[in-house]
Image (cartoon, grey):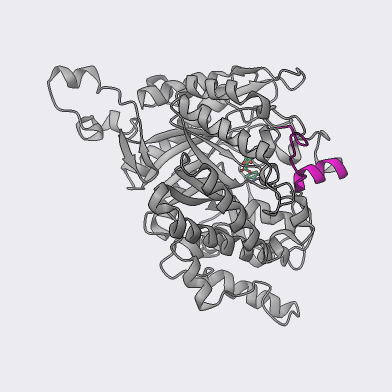
């Protein structure tokens, strides 16, 4: 049994290297390991998991009383937003195949499974006036099946699939959404909180608030430079509402932990000029700080540089007020400190240089940084995703320094298959082993408080606007077969080996970096 910032877990502790036991020394994790070993061995109590999200895997989009959400609506009304014009209507069919999924997770050896709950499966109208018992039953079944197999559930409350009726009221741009989000969360804590001890309010607000600006994510409501900031404000207040709700009514009894998952690429200055270094700092503050600073910093509120730049730009553009609506002192205080852990999704690195691009107005211009990537970096099946392990370490160090070293749970990190990589996905094996090696350096050499790692993704699934053309799974899924057979890729076997040995296998320690 190991207790960490995420609660108490049954972590299998494998013995020390044989040499150490023969010397009859007591074993206490890293302390007695040689330096060369230490850097490739996970700390005692470090947790491993894998992740998914409801819209991307469940299917059953209109079964058993589920309501319509914004992704159902987008893919049905505007199939042109998805490159292969596909949808999550069936996806991995996990709604019907959750028992098999739990079995696979058990085989993998993960300590926890991160999944999300579909708001409209539980509340078809988005409101608590209609509770869909079949939806409650599904998540009860899934949670019980996981626990019966020794896997702890880590639940994301919102992973991008807002009920359409709430979008019709303006979605996250409307501050009233905080009331509805609180009602929804209350229902989840009351129904599942006896067994779920780790919660994430939001997955990647920086990504889904893009759906109110320039991105192709639902609701594709294009109000760049305005919509994202309105949505951001509601999301932060909603997160805080739910944190306080949990503290006031559930924490004493249920004893769980609650955090938020934020995403960020590392931004490396293109040159060592002061302008580029400052530009990369702005990148961090606009994409991560916008959400992290109000919650995790000592002072609270949006980062100074963000308030300053959006204020200035808004003025230049002829707006009467800043496009970033301010928080009151009361709100700043209310949002500050609403965390038990810092959930981080990290995939890749970009170069940053000072400059402005994009529509007027836009967040991109507000941030004033132009990004690029090095053609020499290893590619993946996703144009935006290059394999840059050293950026992961730098990002972890930045977070530790900026927010006073909070416990960080890596809630996603992963790689999409190159064309025809098939089951022999050596690219993904390289990705995970090299990223984890850099993470261990962040832990041991930089002192970062990283408590666990969650691989994105458990299964190949519906990759949003890329449909089924980009595959992130440790398990492949045959989407042309109605029974959606799952087959482990090489990376699933390697991940399993890493979890069981709590080490980076010897044969993957000496990759050469580009
Ligand atoms: C995350 N980018 O999204 C999401 O949380 C997952 O649902 C998704 O499947 C996964 O990463 C893989 O893409 C991102 O372009 C999507 O920078 C795109 C970006 C970042 C995160």
Query: Which residue occupies the foreground of this view, 424 or 180?
Result: 180
- Quadrant of the rendered image containing residue 324: bottom right
How many dots with numbers? 0
Can the viewer see residue 491? no
> Looking at the image, is 112 positioned above or below residue 204?
above
Residue 452 pos. (x, y %): 42, 39
Residue at x 56%, y 53% (from the top left corner)? 186
> Looking at the image, is 34 positioned above or below residue 440?
above
Task: Assign the N terminus to one quadrant of the image.
Answer: top left
Residue 92 pos. (x, y %): 69, 27
Q: Which span of residues is magenta-colored?
A: 59-77
Ligand 1 falls in which quarter?
Answer: top right
Query: Which residue occupies the foreground of this view, 462 or 106?
Result: 106
- Extreme residue in the bottom direction: 320
Can the viewer see residue 103? yes
Residue at x 49%, y 69% (from the top left corner)? 334
Residue at x 66%, y 77% (from the top left corner)? 322
> Looking at the image, is 352 positioned above or below residue 101?
below
- Quadrant of the rendered image containing residue 286: bottom right
């Amino acid at each position: 049994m190991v207790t960490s910032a995420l609660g108490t877990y049954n972590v299998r502790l494998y013995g020390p290297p044989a040499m150490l036991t023969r010397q009859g020394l007591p074993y206490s994790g890293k302390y007695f390991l040689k330096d060369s070993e230490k850097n490739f061995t996970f700390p005692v109590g470090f947790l491993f998991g894998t992740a998914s999200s409801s819209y991307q895997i469940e299917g059953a989009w209109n079964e058993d009383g589920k309501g319509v959400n914004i992704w159902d609506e987008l893919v049905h009304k505007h199939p042109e937003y998805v490159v292969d014009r596909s949808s999550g209507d069936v996806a991995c069919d996990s709604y019907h195949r959750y028992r098999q999924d739990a079995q696979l997770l058990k085989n993998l050896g993960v300590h926890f499974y991160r999944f999300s709950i579909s708001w409209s499966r539980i509340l078809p109208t988005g409101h608590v006036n209609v509770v869909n018992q079949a939806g409650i039953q599904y998540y009860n079944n899934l949670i019980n099946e996981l626990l019966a197999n020794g896997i702890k559930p880590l639940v994301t409350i919102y992973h991008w699939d807002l009920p359409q009726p709430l979008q019709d009221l303006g979605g996250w741009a409307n501050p009233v959404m905080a009331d509805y989000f609180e009602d929804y969360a209350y229902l989840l804590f009351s129904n599942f909180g006896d067994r779920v001890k780790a919660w994430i309010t939001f997955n990647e607000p920086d990504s889904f608030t893009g759906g109110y600006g320039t991105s192709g994510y639902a609701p594709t409501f294009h109000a760049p430079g305005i919509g994202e900031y309105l949505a951001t404000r509601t999301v932060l207040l909603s997160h805080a509402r739910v944190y306080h709700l949990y503290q006031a009514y559930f924490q004493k009894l249920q004893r769980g932990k609650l955090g938020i998952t934020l995403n960020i690429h590392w931004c490396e200055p293109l040159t060592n000029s002061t302008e580029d270094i400052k530009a990369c700092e702005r990148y961090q503050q606009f994409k991560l700080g916008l959400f992290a600073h109000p919650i995790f910093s000592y002072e609270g509120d949006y980062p100074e540089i963000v308030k300053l730049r959006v204020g200035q730009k808004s003025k230049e553009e002829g707006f009467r007020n800043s496009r970033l609506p301010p928080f009151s002192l009361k709100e700043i205080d209310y949002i500050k400190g609403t965390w038990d852990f810092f959930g981080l999704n990290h995939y890749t690195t970009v170069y940053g240089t000072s400059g402005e691009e994009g529509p007027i107005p836009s967040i991109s211009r507000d941030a004033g940084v132009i990004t690029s990537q090095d053609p020499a970096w290893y590619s993946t099946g996703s144009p935006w995703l290059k394999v840059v392990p050293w950026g992961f370490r730098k990002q972890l160090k930045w977070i530790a320094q900026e927010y006073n070293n909070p416990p960080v749970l890596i809630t996603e990190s992963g790689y999409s298959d190159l064309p025809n990589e098939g089951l022999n996905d050596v690219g993904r094996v390289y990705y995970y082993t090299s990223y984890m090696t850099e993470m261990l350096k962040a832990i041991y050499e930089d002192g970062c408080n990283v408590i666990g790692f969650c691989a994105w993704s458990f299964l190949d699934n519906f990759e949003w606007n890329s449909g089924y053309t980009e595959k992130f799974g440790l398990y492949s899924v045959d989407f042309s077969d109605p029974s959606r057979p799952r087959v482990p890729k090489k990376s699933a076997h390697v991940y399993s080996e890493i979890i069981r040995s709590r080490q980076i296998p010897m044969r993957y320690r000496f990759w050469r970096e580009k």
